[in-house]
Image (cartoon, coloured by chain):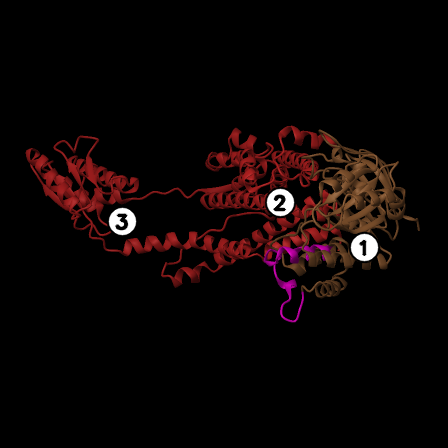
Chain colours: A brown, B red
Amino acid sequence: MTESAVEIRNVVKRYANHVAVRDLSLIVPRGSVYGLLGPNGAGKTTTIRMMLNIIAPDAGTITVLGRPGGDREASDRIGYLPEERGLYPRMQVRRLLRFLADLKGIPGKAANVRIDEWLERLTLRTAERDWGNARVEELSRGMQQKVQFIGALLHDPDLVILDEPFSGLDPVNAQALKDTVVDLKRRRKTVIFSTHVMDSAERMCDAVCIIARGVKVLDDDMATVKSSHGGRHVALALEGDVTPGVAAVLADRSLVARVDASNRFFEVELAPEGDSGSLLARLVASGARIQRFERVQPSLHQIFLRRVGASGVEEGVSGHG
Amino acid sequence: MGRLGAVVKREYMERVRSKWFVIATIFGPLFFGLIMIVPAWLSIRSTRSTEKERVIVLDATGTSLGRGVADRLRGGLFGDTTGARVIAVSPAALADAESTATAAVIRKEATGFLVLGEGAMRDTTVRYAGRNASSIAEVSRIERAVRDAVIGLRLEGLGVRSDAVMGVMKMRMSVDAEQITERGRGGSGRVQFVFAAAISFMMYMLILLHGTNILRSVLEEKTTRVAEVVVASVRPGTLLAGKIIGVGGVALTQIIVWTAASTAMVRARGPIMAAIGVPGLTFQLPSVTPATIALLITFFLLGFLLFAALFAIVGAMVSSEQEAQQAQQPLMLVILAPVLLLQPILLNPMTKLAETASWMPFTGPVIMPLRLSLVPVPTSQVVLSLIVSAVTCVAVIWLAARIYRVGILMYGKRATIREVARWVRQG
């Protein structure tokens, strides 16, 4: 058994007017939760589609679960939740799930048992109502999302690929999804998910890869990512409004390299020559009423902004990227 | 069950379960039955009805011509016209009589009036005016009545006895056309004609109906993004093949149900006709050999595959119903071509046009079955048609598979011809 769930080597994918992925290489360790991060149009969906052999790379090789791309046996062990959710609207939920199970080669009886288990687990089948007998179009959006999760996980895949799983999810369903990911991790399954929501990625991922404009910017486990960017960040919370004095301190480039301000909470990156002691002294002297002052590791959000920057965002190419 | 099996099963079962399939499948034979029974029933009803409508015959010839015409108008399409009123007028009073008759027609006391002018015995034209003047059948009936009456009177004038004239004029002649095939004589030409028309109509309708279903199915998977989930598990080619086989299975199911029901209805026509009071009609069944049936089914399958693939191409190129409406117009022209040829070929299946159309790509799968069920077709022509159709089919399916593979993952806008050409080249 190889160590990696997915190995991508020097992969290139070109479309008519742009290159979606340039010379991308990455390794997803088995049993990890792996975040594929990047702005819209960075090439995340293209990379995922190539892992699933939905589209073929123009150059490079992809190995999934130890087998070359497109291998039937490997594809049966992958569960996929696409970014654009898709279900047959007029099909009965149970029949639809049976069809998805058929596609993965799960025999009928086993599929029925699993479908009922999942429907109960995600409260689509209760004492009052069995939504499994309803048609997909009769379900609310949230319920349809749940059906889509079930479809991706029904065959108990070893590798689960979730493309933007949190987009359009209400908090309850988002929690259900997080619980499911944690459960998969506990059962030694590999989970790859793409997102541009850094908070979720930071809390859930063992390792991340940031890509922008089809190029890999960063690829490492979360601890390394954090520590290699760490040590020079301060979390700062203030009481009341920001006074001109405080603003002047935070704008002093000899002390502060950059500030990510969220009204009364600031994530401050110290300048190379600055230190946290003098920052605290200057803030107190300027009359700031400090609620919190703490040396922290940078958030993934900060790292992302620093590495990708505003220039990494390409407009209008999403959907194929 | 394999992946292909799963796709085929879904496409087939979801369609067969739908209300529309059940309605269409039951409605088909019912429609066939109605076509068979209603005309017979109507003709019986109309001969029974005693309509009060009559024709006024204005006779200015001074002979018994008006009486003769009235006699000949009796019965038939007008119903009981014993009261067809003959008014003898002098040529001078004809104009006044015409206005009176016009008023009577307007008051609905008569259907119309026939003017037999002074020279009606020599003329080749007489005038008729009435509410039913636009009915070709009724006007030609009046024509016949006048012609027969004039001929009768002239013959009497030449010394032929009037009862002999009546006897000769009443004689009817009809041609009983019989088909001659390689197996010798057999089958009625007219029955064969009806059969051929029905077969080609049914095949055409099924191809169109289920071809459109393929388009919708492809489009639905695109717009709902299901395609992406499915092609993560199966190859696009498998999905396309499963779709075409599944929908084709639905079409075959419909054919089998329709054929079985129609056969049963034809067998049971005696009691059905008797139940609605129509006397037993002699009814000949078309003569079709099992080999012809096998060929008909082969051509249907080839035609279905061909057009299904074309519809799948359109479905993969567009991303909404509106775009589909536009994009399928050129395809509709290709599909309509055989229909424009249906009538001339049905009337004359032995011409060069018929021969050519029965092996040309796209028209072959519809026209050849039509000729096969009408006339004996040389084996060489059948083989040529089969080969051309099969090659076209393979080429179009190859094209469809390439376009489909890329097209189903393209959202948002209709693909241009140039883009589609690139998808095909990408290979």
Do the residues indicated by labels 2 and 1 lie within the same chain of the protein? no
In the drawing, does residue B201 fall left or right of residue A152?
A: left
Helix, strand or loop at label 1? It is: loop
Residue B76: assigned label: 3
Give the letter of the chain under mark 2. B
Residue B120: assigned label: none
> Which stretch did the figure color magenta?
A125-151
In the drawing, does residue A13 fall left or right of residue B331?
A: right
Is-magenta flag for residue A215?
no
Asked where in the image residue B127 lies, by quadrant, the reply is: top left
Circle 1 or circle 3, nearest the eye:
1
Give the letter of the chain under mark 3. B
Mark 3: few/some/many CA within 10 Å (<14, 14-19, 20+): some
Magenta part, dominant SS: helix
Q: Residue B173's x, y, as percent?
A: 34, 42
Amino acid, disc 3? Gly
Q: Is residue B239 above or below residue A314?
A: below
Q: Residue B376: tell me if it is visible.
A: no
Residue at the image point whose x is 27% and y is 48% from the top: B77
Indicate which disc, 3 or 2, sits on the residue closer to the N terminus: 3
In the drawing, does residue A266 fall left or right of residue B289?
A: right
In the drawing, does residue B48 fall left or right of residue A129?
A: left
